[in-house]
Image (cartoon, rainbow, N blue to C red):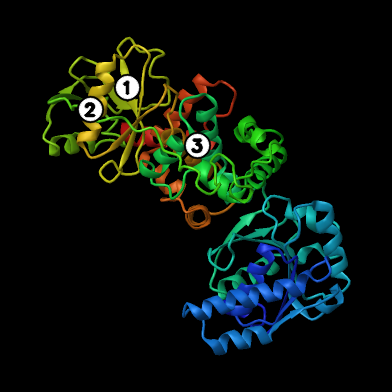
């Protein structure tokens, strides 16, 4: 049997229960793919209103030239709001998009089971509840699975196809092929808290919140560094304002609870305050930022222009450690017209080496430790960049003993490379480095635990949250030893278990060391 044979009949009816933004989006996807679509909502009149809203969106697609008028008319002819569950009896696939409440979902599917045929696939769009638990109340739990679309469903390509503990493989295959036939990019994953994206993405929000809570940088600066240095499309503060602080915090709490309060998933007190205050973000007019008309746009901290040193000394890294993620910097400095001398510091050098400023202060890529603690020599950390050549901003974290003159020299050095510079407080791991190290480790751990295949993990993180690289590929490019060492130093600075490297990462790092030694 070919893959295409497993999908539901292209002319088969798709039922969507729950007609909020997500339900409308899913219905539109199925409708444009050619299916008859039935809409149901428990609130009287809501299904008809949703049908009108979908019709308006299809009309806008016609106006933009993305949908032919004849295709719009045919789609609207297949769209039917119904007043009761009985109107869904002919469905071959029923997708639920109601509130995130386990009891409500179980009650709905129990009722649906008595209406639809035994061959009808049942799917929940839950983003954080257990698919296995949703199916637990059913007479035939094997036909229920998760189809987690991302908002807005008509635009975002990713769909997580979640197989619960009791889900039949044939049901999962059928759903996967159906979603693929709709033009989406499905990924398979196990029924684990947060699935792929909401599990692995937690550090992107959590590390930014911790940096802010420690007073190391304000939200606008953190966002700018992750965008302009780390290559992310949006910073975590602006993204959670867009998602909704209440929604994002609820997912974090759900995953944390489902993980039995594992410290790696601990929620943020600062975000809790926003939610308690009703400052949910854009939809409330204020979150981390103020969205009132005329409110000033937040500005990141950017250093004033400083004079670059005329010459620096580059001390090579420890033998066998390679040039590290910042290995291109000496070349960029030379291209900027600054004299670079290269020196071999020997076995006592840090793995990635360092740049000696004229007064002897060491400028180096953060290793996850404090710039102040444990160093007899004044040092300034700079942050990890996705690409040091194309990055437009760099963050610096000087130790407490660093002179203002050295900070100005380091600032001027990166400004000479065409970068804006944000000077933040001395915080272990800085901003991008700690975030990327955690993302890579979470992804390695998820792959080792068979949450999803490595390929599906990277695909999900690129398409679901628009990361510049899949975290497994990013971790591979940085090297498992580098990621491990960042986390070990963070773990020493914060001995709570939050930053303890996963066993998968430790094994990969050991294998790298063995490969080098041989």
Question: How many angstroms separate mark 3 from mark 2 (CA)?
Answer: 33 Å
Please provide percent x and percent y for residue 359: 20, 14
What residue appears at the point 12 percent right and 31 percent down from the top-left corner?
338
Residue in front for this viewpoint, 196 or 515: 196
Residue indicated by mark 2: 306
User: Which numbered disc covers residue 438?
Assistant: 3
Disc 3 secondary structure class: helix
Question: How many angstroms separate mark 2 from mark 1 (CA)?
Answer: 16 Å
Q: Earlier in the sequence, mark 3 or mark 2?
A: 2
Instruction: Please state, as top left, top right, bottom left or bottom right, where the C terminus lies in the image.
Output: top left
User: Which numbered disc covers residue 380?
Assistant: 1
Residue in front for this viewpoint, 455 or 239: 239
Disc 1 secondary structure class: strand
Taking 436 as reference, is 36 left or right? right
Mark 3 or mark 2, whichever is nearer to me: 2
Mark 3 or mark 1, whichever is nearer to me: 1
Taking 123 as reference, is 204 left or right? left
Residue 500, visible in the rendered structure: no
What residue appears at the point 31 percent right and 37 percent down from the top-left corner?
325
């Amino acid at each position: 049997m070919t893959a295409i044979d497993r999908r539901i009949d292209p002319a088969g009816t798709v039922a969507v229960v729950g007609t909020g933004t997500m339900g409308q989006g899913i219905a539109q996807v199925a409708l444009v793919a050619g299916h008859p679509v039935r809409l149901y909502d428990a609130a009287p009149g809501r299904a008809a209103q949703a049908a009108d809203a979908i019709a308006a969106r299809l009309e806008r697609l016609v106006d933009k030239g993305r949908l032919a008028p004849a295709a719009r008319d045919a789609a609207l002819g297949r769209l039917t709001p119904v007043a009761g569950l009985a109107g869904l009896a002919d469905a071959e696939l029923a997708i639920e998009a109601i509130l995130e409440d386990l009891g409500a979902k179980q009650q709905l599917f129990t009722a649906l089971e008595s209406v639809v045929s035994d061959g009808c696939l049942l799917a929940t769009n839950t983003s954080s509840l257990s698919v296995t638990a949703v199916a637990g109340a059913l007479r035939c739990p094997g036909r229920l699975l998760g189809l987690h679309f991302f908002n807005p469903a008509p635009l975002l390509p990713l769909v997580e196809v979640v197989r619960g503990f009791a889900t039949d493989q044939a049901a999962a295959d059928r759903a996967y092929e159906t979603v693929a036939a709709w033009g989406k990019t499905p990924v398979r994953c196990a029924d684990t808290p947060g699935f792929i994206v909401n599990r692995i993405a937690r550090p992107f929000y959590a590390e930014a919140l911790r940096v802010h809570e420690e007073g190391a940088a304000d939200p606008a600066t953190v966002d700018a560094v992750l965008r302009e240095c780390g290559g992310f499309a949006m910073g975590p503060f602006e993204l959670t304002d867009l998602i909704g602080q209440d929604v994002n915090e609820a997912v974090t709490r759900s995953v944390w609870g489902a993980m039995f309060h594992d410290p790696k998933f601990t929620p943020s007190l600062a975000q809790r305050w926003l939610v308690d205050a009703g400052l949910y973000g854009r939809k409330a007019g204020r979150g981390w930022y103020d969205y009132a008309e005329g409110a000033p746009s937040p500005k990141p901290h950017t250093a004033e222009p400083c004079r670059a040193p005329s010459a620096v000394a580059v001390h090579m890294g420890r033998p066998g450690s390679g040039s590290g993620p910042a290995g291109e910097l000496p070349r960029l400095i030379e291209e900027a017209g600054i004299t670079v001398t290269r020196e071999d510091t020997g076995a006592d050098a840090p793995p990635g080496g360092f740049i000696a400023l004229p007064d002897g202060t060491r400028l180096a890529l953060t290793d996850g430790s404090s710039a102040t603690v444990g160093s007899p020599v004044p040092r300034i950390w700079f942050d990890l960049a996705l690409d040091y050549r194309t990055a437009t901003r760099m963050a610096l974290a000087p130790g407490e003993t660093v002179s203002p003159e050295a900070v100005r020299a380091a600032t001027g050095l990166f400004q000479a490379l065409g970068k804006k510079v944000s000077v933040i407080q001395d915080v272990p791991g800085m901003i991008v480095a700690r975030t990327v190290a955690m993302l890579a480790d979470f992804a390695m751990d998820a792959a080792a635990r068979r949450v999803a295949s490595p390929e599906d993990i990277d695909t999900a993180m690129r398409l679901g949250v628009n990361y510049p690289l899949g975290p497994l590929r990013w971790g591979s490019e940085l090297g498992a030893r580098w990621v491990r060492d960042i986390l070990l130093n963070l773990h020493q600075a914060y001995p709570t278990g939050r930053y303890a490297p996963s066993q998968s990462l430790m094994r990969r790092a050991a294998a790298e060391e063995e490969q080098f030694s041989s």
